[in-house]
Image (cartoon, rainbow, N blue to C red):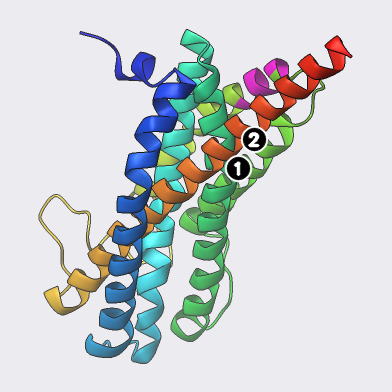
């Protein structure tokens, strides 16, 4: 059975497949994010302890999930590039990094906005917040390394190694509230014994997560397609310069 990564390694095949996925991803993102924001900001109830400030959750929590998901995908693409030398995997890892960094930044900013009325402070150096900040620095490091060399292959390999090493931080983020005593509340959705959050809040939260995932797929495909087009133009320009 053929490896799906090998099947997608062809730029022409990727362009055809991505052209079919893009409209569906765009529609899902618009519908889910619109419904999630409406449900989270208007129809869902206020929290009995946190009041209206709990509505930040509908952006903060999905952004935090996406920060981890984007990095996991980036690490998988990086491993594929190192093992099978797939150039498209390198492009996908590079394209994923800025998107993941944006989600991480949103999670950090909204977390601070939520923490101030909840904890009485904008920031604490507890395990969860610090590990997410480290994740943000890994994203920045990946973007910096991928453009730090004149040889794009060397930059891609260095960035890929960093992405794989940084994946160790993902379980630390996930289980930090269980391993250490932190101000951050423990998991209330992704639990072995089931969610502890009421369905009136859980439904728009999960819908927002689906919308953010679709948005990630949409932006990732657009960035990869644009990079493939840019590289094709560069090759044509070099060929024209060589024949002139």
- The image shows residue 82, relative to residue 139, as above or below, that is above
Q: In the image, is 182 to the left or to the right of 194?
A: right
At 49% from the left and 24% from the top, the residue drawn is 89
Which residues fall within the magenta stretch?
153-159
| 92, above or below 96, in the image | above
Residues tagged 1 and 2 counted as in contact (Cβ below 8 A) = yes
Task: Tell me, yes or no, whether the highlighted magenta stretch contains residue 157.
Answer: yes
Which disc is residue 212 wearing? Answer: none
Q: Main secondary structure of the magenta part?
A: helix
Q: Is residue 228 visible?
A: yes
Q: Which residue is mark 2?
A: 142
Please tell me which residue is depicted at 43% across the width and 60% down the height of the picture: 63
Q: Name the residue: 29% across, 73% down.
A: 36
| Corner quadrant of residue 148 | top right
- How far, Cα to Cα, is label 1 from label 2? 5 Å
Q: Nearer the viewer, residue 1 or 49?
A: 1
Query: Could you classify mark 2 by the number of other residues whose Cα lies within 10 Å: few (under 14), some (14-19), or many (20 or more)?
Result: many
Q: Nearer the viewer, residue 218 or 138?
A: 218
Q: Residue at x 51, y 32 (%)?
A: 92
Coordinates of residue 125 in the picture (x, y in percent): 57, 61
Q: How many marks?
A: 2
Q: Is residue 233 above or below residue 131?
A: above
Quadrant including the N terminus: top left
Q: Which mark is residue 139?
A: 1
Q: Quadrant of residue 240?
A: top right
Residue 35 appears at what percent x and percent y? Answer: 27, 75
- The reply, left or right, for residue 244 in relation to residue 128 is right
């Amino acid at each position: 059975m053929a490896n799906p990564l090998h099947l997608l390694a062809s730029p022409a095949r990727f362009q055809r497949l991505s052209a079919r996925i893009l409209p569906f991803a765009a529609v899902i993102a618009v519908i889910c994010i619109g419904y999630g924001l409406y449900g989270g900001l208007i129809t869902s109830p206020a929290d009995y302890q946190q009041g209206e400030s709990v509505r930040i959750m509908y952006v903060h929590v999905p952004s935090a999930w996406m920060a981890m998901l984007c990095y996991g995908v980036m690490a998988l693409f990086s491993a594929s590039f190192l093992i099978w030398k797939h150039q498209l995997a390198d492009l996908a890892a590079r394209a994923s990094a800025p998107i993941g960094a944006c989600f991480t930044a949103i999670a950090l900013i909204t977390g601070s906005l939520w923490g101030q009325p909840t904890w009485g402070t904008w920031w604490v150096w507890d395990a969860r917040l610090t590990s997410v900040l480290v994740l943000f620095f890994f994203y920045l490091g990946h973007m910096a390394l991928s453009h730090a060399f004149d040889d794009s292959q060397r930059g891609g390999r260095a960035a890929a190694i960093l992405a794989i090493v940084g994946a160790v931080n993902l379980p630390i983020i996930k289980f930090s509230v269980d391993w250490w005593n932190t101000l951050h509340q423990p998991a209330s959705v992704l639990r072995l014994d089931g969610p502890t959050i009421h369905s009136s809040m859980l439904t728009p939260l999960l819908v927002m997560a689906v919308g953010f995932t679709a948005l990630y797929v949409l932006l990732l495909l657009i960035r990869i397609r644009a990079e493939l087009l840019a590289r094709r133009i560069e090759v044509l320009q070099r060929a024209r310069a060589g024949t002139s």
